[in-house]
Amino acid sequence: LLPGIQNVLEHFSQYMTVPQIKALSDQVNSIRIELADLTTTEFKRYFSGGFKKASGQQQSVPIEDVCLVLSVLDRTVREGLISWLIDQQLAEYKILFDDTQDDAWLDKIDLRFSWFRDCLIEFERKHAALLPAEWDVACKFAAEFFHLTASMLDQVMEKRCVELDAKLVLFAVQRAANFEALMARRFPGRAQTLFQSVLVGRFQKRMSIYTASLDKTLTDLIDQLVAKFQQLGPPSAEYGTSAVPIPTSSDLFVFYKKSIQQLLQLGMNANILVDLSRLFKKYLHEYAQRCLTGLLPKIASAHTTTTAGLLQSFLKEGDMPRLSNDEIYLVCCILITAEFCAETSHQLQEKLKEKAGDLALHEAFDFTNEREMFHGVVSSCVQVLVQDLETACEPALQTMTKMQWANVDTVGDESRYVASIRQHLRQCVVRIRDCLGQARKYFMQFCFRFVNAFVPKFINAILRCRPVSVTGAEQLLLDTHALKTELVNLPVLESAAGRKPPEAFTKLVIKGMTKAEMILKVKYTCLFIYLFIC
C-alpha cells in the first residue's frame, strides 16, 4: 500500500503549499520513518552476530515481512542495513586474521578464503531465500571481503616485510589468483569490476622480490648451461652432416616462456612484464657471451706481428694452426644457434608486446639490440671460418713469394703453390658448405668475405715476387688465371647440384683477379720492352 501512496503523492509534489496535501505528505513521511525504525530493529535483532548466529526465535514479525517492507522504503535504509550485516559478519574475520595472529601470514592465506567460503555457504543455505535477490547481499559481502582482505594483506606484509621471499610471494599470489577466479565464476558478469586483481594487485609492488630471485635463478641457469656444454662436449658430426643448434640453446627460451606464462596466469599487470623484459635482455647478452662467443675456437691471425706470429711464418705448411673438422662443425653449430636465438628473440619481443597492452611501445619490449648482438655472433663465426681458410692458404702465398721467378725459363703447368691453395679450398669450402646446408646465405657470406680477404693478399704476394723474368711473369699469369677459375667456382666446388655461382660473386672474383692479371701484364710488358731495348 505504501508504494501506491508514495506514487500518488509524487503527482501532487507541486501542490505542497496546499495545507491538506502538505499534512498528508507529512503523515506519510512519519509512517515511513516509523516503519524504518521498526524494520531496522527487527532486522538487527534477527541478524545480530552475523549469518551463523541469526535466529528468529524472538522475532515479533517474520523476517520475510521485514525484508518486504524494507524493499519499499528508502534505498539508504536498506543499504545501511546490508552494510551493517556485512560488518557484523566481518567482525569475526578481523579478529581471527589480525596482523598479530599467525594465521594472518601469507603461508596460511588459504585459511582466509576457507573462512569466507564457509560463511557464504552458511548464508546461501539459511538466509538467501529470506533476503530479496535484488539486494544482492552475497555479492556485496564478497566485494567487501575482497577489499578488507587486500587492506589487511598490505598491513601484514608491511609489518613482516623482512620475512618475504619469492617462493612465499608466488605461493600467495597463486592462491589469491585462484580465489579471484573462483569468485568470478560464482558471480559472473561482475568479476571485472568487483574482484579482478583486487587481491593479486596488492602483491604488485612486492614483485621486486620475485624479479631479484629470478635474476639469481637465471645466473644459475647460465652457469648450468656452460657446465652442461663442458660435460657433454661440443656437438660432433654424428648429429648429421648439417650443423644443428647447440642442444642447450632452447633451454633459456623455454625458461623465459614459462616465466611469462606464470605471471600471466597470476594476473599480474603489464608493469611486471617491463621488469621481466629487461631481465630477459640481460641474460640474452650473458648467453651470447658465455655460451656462444666464449665457445668459439681461437686461431692465430695471419696478420699477427707478435714474436710468436713471426716465428709461426717459418713453420712448415702442415704445422700452421688450423681448425679441425670437429671445430669447423662447432663453429657452424654456434652460427646456427646464434641465428636461432636472433629469430627467437624477435618472437619473444612480439609475445611480450602482445601481452603488454597499452605498454607495448615501451622501450623495454624492443629487442633490436639483442637481435643485432646475435647477428654479430653469426658474423664472428663467419670471420673465424674465413680466418682459418686464410691461415691455410698463407704458407702457399709465402712459397709463391720465395720462388726464384727470375730463373723460370719455361712455362709449364700451374705452380705447386696453386695446387696447394686449390687443395685447401676444396677441403675447407666443401666441408663448410655441407655444414651450412640449411643456412646457405651464411655460406655465401663466407665465400664473399674470403674472396675479399684473399685477393688483396694474392695481389700483394704478386708485387713481392721479384725479380721476375718474362717467362716467370707468363707463369704467374697462368697461375693467376687458374686461381681465378677456382675462386669463381668456390660456392659450387664438387657440388652435384649443378648450380651456378651467384652473378654478384662471379663479378667480385673477376674484378679482383682481373686487377692481378693486369698487374702481371704490365710487369710482363715492361720486361719485354726492357729486353727489346737491351
Image (tube, rainbow, N blue to C red):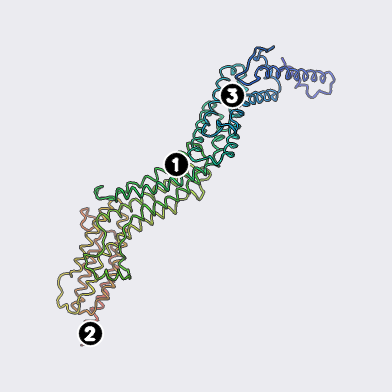
Q: Residue 459, located in which quarter of the rendered image?
A: bottom left
Residue 140 drawn above or below residue 268: above
Which quarter of the figure is the N terminus placed in?
top right
Q: For mark 3, what is the residue? A: 138
Q: Tag 2: Cα neighbours inside 10 Å, few (<14), some, or many (≥20)?
A: few
> Residue 494 or 504: which is nearer the viewer?
494
- Horizontal side, residue 168 vs residue 451: left or right: right
Q: Residue furthest right?
A: 19
Which residue is found at the position 65% from the left and 12% from the top? 57
Classify mark 1: residues with Cα within 10 Å, few (<14), some (14-19) or many (20+).
Answer: some
Q: CA distance from mark 2 to mark 1?
A: 79 Å
Residue to which mark 2 is pinned? 530
Between label 3 and label 1, give the one nearer the viewer: 1
Q: Nearer the viewer, mark 2 or mark 3?
A: 3
Of the pair 360 and 256, the residue shown nearer to us: 256
Seen at 36% across and 50% down, the residue is 226
User: Which label belongs to residue 259?
Assistant: 1
**What x and y, as percent, mark residue 5?**
74, 17
